[in-house]
Image (spheres, grey):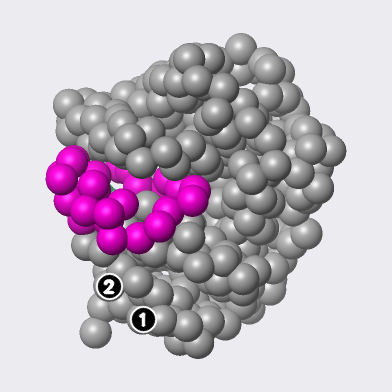
Amino acid sequence: MILVTGGAGYIGSHTSVELIKNGYDIVILDNLCNSKYESINRIIELTGKEVPFEKVDLLDYDGVKAVFDKYDIDAVIHFAGLKAVGESVEKPMLYYNNNITGTLNLLRIMNDYGCKKIVFSSSATVYGITKVVPVTEDMPTGTTNPYGSTKLMLENIMRDISVSDSDWSIVLLRYFNPIGAHESGRIGEDPNGIPNNLMPRICNVATGKMEKLTVWGDDYDTHDGTGVRDYIHVLDLADGHVAAVRKTFSTNGVMTYNLGTGIGYSVYDLIKTFERVNDTSVPYVVCPRRAGDIGALYADCTRAEEEMGWKAKRGLEDMCRDTYRFLINNPNGYSE
Ligand code: NAD
Ligand code: WQD
């Protein structure tokens, strides 16, 4: 059985559906601090399978241990964590405690139960302010905010664990910019509060919750001056996790993979594609650059293809269309 921590969240819910479709038995652990139980109902609806759910906080050591007592867990996919960059700058202790202590609890318990296979949600944020694109996994790392630091620290903690005990099999997945939703329109991203990321903000403008999008800078050294990123469909990301968990059953050691498409799209590319495929409009105004932003960041995903046989299949149009379908079908997200 696979334990999916954070499985009620955006990426975890899509991955849970794909794991079940690929024949895996799963149990989801989540404290629902940034998600709703309704996403579990939707996973059950989409797969036609009962999915065991444990509302447990990773900071609750005994609670997590009880989950390992109750289920026979062979491997863990570990999504659970806090992820808002700005909030992490304001509340570093919250982020270090939740992400680091929570993961250390999990790793200690896994070790005690002899479960030594883990797939971890890292992030392209560990490349810091790199100016070289596309980025490969062995390029230097560095972080610019507490959220990013938790990801880099956890990567390093897991590398040390692997050095000390070669039975561990650890896959570190560095996601680029996940967007999109399940093609059924039943699961998608339902952010709490005012979102900071580009796609959720485009959605807010398209639905009239925000009047205009602010484009943060049009004077970068990119094809149209706006920031370029590697947007990846959340279902391609989910497939990447299925490949990664498979990898943990065949190889020991630490493996690090970029998960992106390898293609860089600008803010204007995203706005125009979203408008065209969804026949809607996204008014915007250009503002100065956002502090800490870099011009272009996209991935070299050769290693994931060569070693896991994984490659992103979906294009920007699919990402924009699927995002909008979830939005239109669920105007209040997962709320009643
Ligand atoms: P999300 O917030 O939708 O999902 C994370 C889930 O973890 C939520 O359901 C939340 O309730 C749960 N959680 C948080 N702390 C917990 C704790 N202490 N105990 C139990 N559950 C807890 O986020 P997401 O976008 O699905 O991201 C999943 C993972 O991928 C995160 O670790 C995130 O840092 C990482 N990541 C996300 C992105 C992105 O842009 N979405 C990019 C790179 C990496
Ligand atoms: C994308 C582009 C903005 C909003 C963040 C995290 C990173 C990772 C992914 C978790 C940039 C521009 C945005 C807006 C804009 N998350 N933009 N107007 O900055 O690549 O990465 O999410 O690990 O850690 O830092 O993503 O979506 O915020 O920005 O012009 O209203 O859109 O300047 O060029 P980013 P983003």
Q: Amino acid at mark 2?
A: Tyr
Which residue appears at 52% of the width and 40% of the height? 117
Q: Nearer the viewer, residue 188 or 307?
A: 307
Q: Which residues are magenta?
A: 56-85
Which residue appears at 79% of the width and 38% of the height? 307
Residue 103 colored in magenta in the image? no
Disc 1: CA contacts within 10 A as few (<14), some (14-19) or many (>=20): some
- Can see residue 118? yes
Q: Nearer the viewer, residue 90 or 38?
A: 38
Which residue appears at 31% of the width and 52% of the height? 68
Q: Is residue 116 left or right of residue 112?
A: right
Residue 61 colored in magenta in the image? yes
Indicate the position of residue 59 as horizontal and vertical percent values. 18, 41
293 shown above or below 43: above
Q: Specify the label residue 41 is tagged with.
A: 1
Q: Amino acid at mark 1?
A: Asn
Disc 2 and disc 1 in contact, CB within 8 angstroms: yes
State how far apart marks 2 and 1 are (Cα).
7 Å
Within 8 Å of ligand 1, the CB of disc 1?
no
Question: Which picture quadrant has residue 6?
Answer: bottom left
SS assignment at label 2: loop
Question: Which picture quadrant has residue 85?
Answer: top left
252 shown above or below 57: above
Residue, disc 2 = 37
SS assignment at label 1: helix
Q: Is residue 23 left or right of residue 263?
A: left
Q: Nearer the viewer, residue 60 or 74?
A: 74
Disc 2: CA contacts within 10 A as few (<14), some (14-19) or many (>=20): some
